[in-house]
Image (cartoon, rainbow, N blue to C red):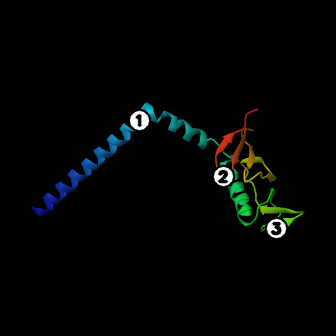
Amino acid sequence: MNTTKMRAGGLAVLIAATGAFGLTACGSDTDGDAGTDTEVSEQASVDVATDLETAKAAVDEALADDDWTQVMLASDVDSPTVKYGLMVMPFVASDAADRVTGTVDIDGGDYTIEAVSAATGETWQIDQSGEITQVTE
């Protein structure tokens, strides 16, 4: 008899939890969240986001040690190296990117890095705060 009560109680909890989850999922489907859905879709469509974020991380690493005015991103170095008065950081772009900025100019800690999507030809940029935006002409 106790087993039957425990199973019935467990079933009741499961049904209640499923119902609560269902209501929560349906409740978030309002017009008030439409802007958020659009932002997520736009961010998801940036196929070079990983390249931009990796390049930003390399520049941030270079700036952590010194105040450089330029940082070069290069695929032919294995570790951070100073060449020709520039900090050269290892960076290899993925196949998603047709082009990524090679030399990043830094002005008072502010910088942008651009990448061109190989699939769409769209140009995207990331700034020092990590915000990714599309470059429009």
Q: Of the residues under marks 1 and 3, which one precedes in the sequence?
A: 1
How many neighbours does mark 1 have within 10 angstroms: few (below 14), some (14-19), or many (20 or more)?
few
Q: What distance separates the C-alpha of mark 2 from that of mark 3?
A: 23 Å
Q: What amino acid is at disc 3?
A: Thr
Eyeballing the image, is 69 above or below 15? below
Depth check: give the residue in front, 85 or 74. Answer: 85
Mark 1 residue element:
loop
Q: List the single residue furthest toward the front.
A: 108
Depth check: give the residue in front, 34 or 107. Answer: 107
* Left or right for 42, reference 87: left
- Give residue 127's mark: none
Eyeballing the image, is 43 above or below 73? above
Q: What amino acid is at disc 1?
A: Asp
- Give residue 81's mark: 3
Mark 2 residue element:
helix
Looking at the picture, how far across and down is residue 113, in whole percent?
A: 74, 49
